Image (cartoon, helix red, strand yellow):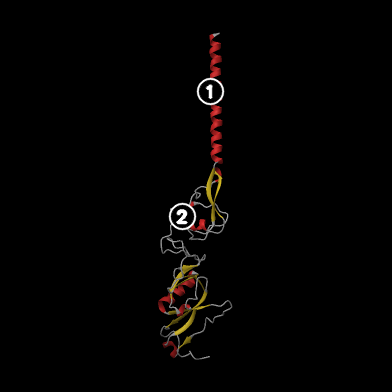
Amino acid sequence: MGRRIMAVLAAVVVGLIGVAAVLLYASGADARAVAEQRPQTVFVAQELVPLGTSAADAVAKGLMVSTQIAAKGVPAGALTKVDDATGKLVALTDIAPGEFVVASRFGVTPLGQKAIQVPPGQVAISVSLSDPARVGAFVTPGSRIVIYDTFTPVAGATAGAAAATKQTRVLLDDVLVIAVGSTSLTPVANATSGAPAQAATGALVTVALPPRTAAKLVHGIQTGTLYAALRGSDTKTDLGQVVSDSTLFNN
């Protein structure tokens, strides 16, 4: 009889332990479910946030807004607050409308550093041009230009008196300008104020070219004097035309 009582008591104890374990698991599951549903603040881009825009400006202009979603739906690394520290950071790339904003999309851009977008398969070359040689202030990022080269021919390269004088030819007939001074097609805001980059007053023109064509420009920079002209949409240039001292007034 005593053994039966002990067995019954043991079974009861085991049962109670099992019930307690189930209750504890259920309680923990409820807690986890509540935690997953607990709202958390994140930021969503309402409109395009351009490259170089500070986080503070993006919020102030309504480009991105805060919203609350269940914690389990928060993307890893999501931007959860914009304060004095994070507000000074700038967008490292364009942020498309509808994106959950992650903190890594913002960073510090050193003062004076400017982003420049080089078309795929091309290289960027900078050319120092005088104001007249870059059509005053009218050559801007996005312009297409013709580049002329005035040079002294190598002795014996051509026949006649013209060989001893300077010649001018079209070096490149259709070139995309991607930056002028510190202003580019993809300008970065000033890192301290968030203000957009100001138009350049210098005469450094940066163009994008295929590598083989870029080699011609680099050689022209080293050996001749370059002059640029704005290109119209239907402009046709004569790559074979040679103008020299002796032919300047010829038809």
Which residue occupies the extreme front position in the image? 60
The residue beneath circle 1 is 17
Is 34 on the left-hand or right-hand side of 114? Answer: right
The circle drawn on residue 87 is 2
Percent from the top left, x then y, of residue 127? Answer: 44, 73
Mark 1 Cα-neighbour bin, 10 Å: few <14, some 14–19, many ≥20: few
Q: CA distance from mark 1 to mark 2?
A: 54 Å
Q: Amino acid at mark 1?
A: Ile
Comes first in the chain, label 1 or label 2:
1
Q: Amino acid at mark 2?
A: Gly
The correct choice, above or below, for 154 with respect to 34 in the image is below
Q: In front: 171, or 158?
A: 171
Q: In front: 111, or 119?
A: 111
Percent from the top left, x then y, of residue 108? Answer: 43, 57
Is 191 on the left-hand or right-hand side of 32? Answer: left
Query: Could you say whether the residue bearing mark 1 is in a helix, strand or loop?
Result: helix
